[in-house]
Image (cartoon, rainbow, N blue to C red):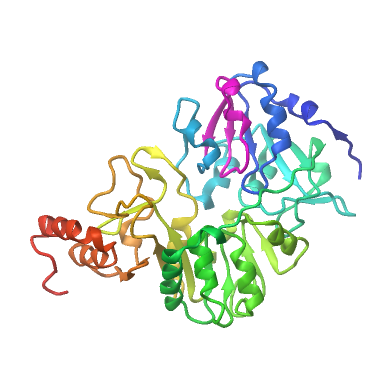
Amino acid sequence: MSYSYTTADEAVKVIKSNDRVFVHGSAATPSTLLEALANRSEELKNVEIVSITTLGAMPLTEERCRDSFFINSLFVSENVRSAVNSPQGCYVPIFLSEIGILFRRNILPLDVALLNVSPPDAHGYCSLGVSVDIARAAAETAKILIAQVNPHMPRTHGDGMVHISRFDHVVEANDPLPSVDYSTKIGENERKIGQNIAELIEDRSTLQMGIGAIPDAVLDALHNHKDLGVHTEMFSNGILGLMDSGALTNKFKTRHPGKIVSAFAVGNQKMYDRINDNPIFSFHATSYVNDTAVIRKNPKMISINSCLEMDLTGQVCADSIGTYQYSGVGGQMDFMRGAALSEGGKPIMALSAATKKGFSKIVPFLKEGAGVVTTRAHMHYVVTEYGIAYLYGKNLHQRAYELMKIAAPEHRDDLEKAIIKRFGSLTHPVS
């Protein structure tokens, strides 16, 4: 096993103008390498940056970098949102499960990949840590691999091992992972939504959930359930409480029984410590975790997702506010469809009935330019703090009526008028 460390400044010198560079995402955002790359902005032009969500500072979007780097985002995060909605960037609509295809089929061939990995073990293997997701495909296809070896990165089990000899340049880093905690954002509405969703979940179900106040509220409401499992694109701190309650055993999963399966995780240090070298957690590429053929094999698969707004027919906008690109398609459709195909599965869309400014999230029509992430044909359960609407098998008129009933009370009159204007009456004759 032979390798030597170099500095971040030296390592990023291999990046040339017009290269396409992959940046490791989520809690594995390689901050040391990004800062070194930004410092070369005067020497570079038109370097394309591809990634999913990144966390922390993003120096490549600073004014000094405007003509040097183009942010071609595969899932828009807060730190690149302004750039993506400007001439400095754009967004690629893509299912999270299929991003690896872009790399492997040379649709988006990668010149360089910047990775944030754990220190090598006695056999020379580093771990992609808490972000295996699309980084696995990037590590296997990029022409040049640059790794920042970071003692803060948990060593994870699963499919995220990369031998140190695979890296063309190795940099020592000491970047603490970003700490995220949504428990402080759980309010009364989130608690009500969590309780409503918990009523839909049976014992021995397998869960998929994202991160945020609503997913954590759901997990808090499940502590008295029995023999739950997890097969999810991502998870956060709320999973620890579910584990400690004894409700999470993973016994009745058909894929990886006894294991928590995920592609990536973002949370606090307590969660990262729990994950480190813990064989209960198994991290895999999103091409596997988000494959509907894999998801559906788990019986009673529960998919819990959220959105920005929904129209009265059940069309879901989860990635944009009108034409303003806010996030991305991600894995929502992968899991909504996988849960629908699972025996006893339930795809659930959860949302607060209104925004913090009081605007209804259930609307007659989506905003002009809004992206439809999940179609109305895929909708089954919709949950707000005011109740549960079951849309599957209902016609457009019936759906509109069911959604009006779980909208914020102050908006129901306007929605009622919209239903009557569109369909001629409030309720359908067969309702």
Q: Residue furthest top?
A: 42
- Residue 106: which quarter of the image? top right
Q: Magenta segment: does it hold 34?
A: no
Considering only vertical position in the picture, is 182 above or below 203? above
Q: Nearer the viewer, residue 374 or 197?
A: 197
Q: Nearer the viewer, residue 120 or 324?
A: 324
Considering only vertical position in the picture, is 105 above or below 212? above
- Residue 184: which quarter of the image? bottom right
For residue 133, side relative to residue 344 (left or right): right
* Residue 220 horizontal/vertical position (percent): 54, 71
Considering only vertical position in the picture, is 294 above or below 251? above
Which quadrant of the figure contains the N terminus?
Answer: top right
Residue range corresponding to the magenta coloring: 47-73
* Residue 125 horizontal/vertical position (percent): 82, 51
Residue at point 46%, 63% (across, down): 187
Residue at point 17%, 74% (across, down): 431
Q: Is residue 316 among what the camera can see?
A: no
* Residue 318 horizontal/vertical position (percent): 40, 51
Q: Is residue 371 among what the camera can see?
A: yes
Residue at point 49%, 37% (across, down): 81
For residue 21, side relative to residue 13 (left or right): left
Q: Magenta segment: does it hold 56?
A: yes
* Residue 289 horizontal/vertical position (percent): 58, 60
